[in-house]
Image (tube, rainbow, N blue to C red):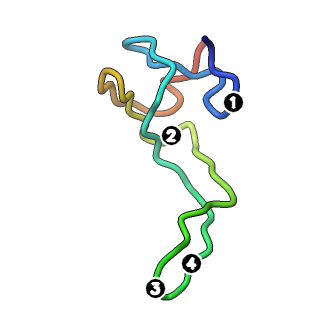
Amino acid sequence: MPNDNVLIGMECPKCKSEGPFNIECTATFTVWDDGTDLEYSELDWEDSATCICKNCGFEGKAFDFKIR
């Protein structure tokens, strides 16, 4: 089933898995001196972010995982 949410248009170029992927992201958290509540309000990544397929271990950039 094709991705239809945050991974829409992405698949592993090696094994064709549609995820999950480890993606280097930027997130916004509320942070106190003793830590964070781990709830984020924004999550984003660039095409140049490191992306790793959890299925086969292929590592590349997020751009490499875009279906063309």
- Residue 50: name its quadrant: top left
Residue under circle 1? 5
Q: Nearer the viewer, residue 20 or 61?
A: 20
Per the image, label 1 sits on a secondary structure element best described as loop
Q: Amino acid at mark 3?
A: Asp
Residue at x 45% of width, y 11% of height: 16
C-beta proximity under 8 Å, tags 4 and 1? no
Residue 53 lies, in percent from the top left, at 39, 27
Question: Which mark's residue is nearer the viewer, 2 or 1?
Answer: 1
Q: Which is more N-terminal, label 1 or label 4?
A: 1
- Mark 4–mark 2 distance (CA, rounded to whole Å): 26 Å
Per the image, label 3 sits on a secondary structure element best described as loop
Which numbered dot is residue 48?
A: 2
Which numbered dot is residue 34?
A: 3
Residue lying farthest bottom?
A: 33
- Mark 4–mark 3 distance (CA, rounded to whole Å): 8 Å
Q: Which is more N-terminal, label 1 or label 3?
A: 1
Residue 6 lies, in percent from the top left, at 65, 34
Q: Which is more N-terminal, label 2 or label 4?
A: 4
Q: Nearer the viewer, residue 58 or 56?
A: 56
Residue under circle 4? 31
Residue at x 56% of width, y 55% of height: 26
Residue 5 lies, in percent from the top left, at 69, 30
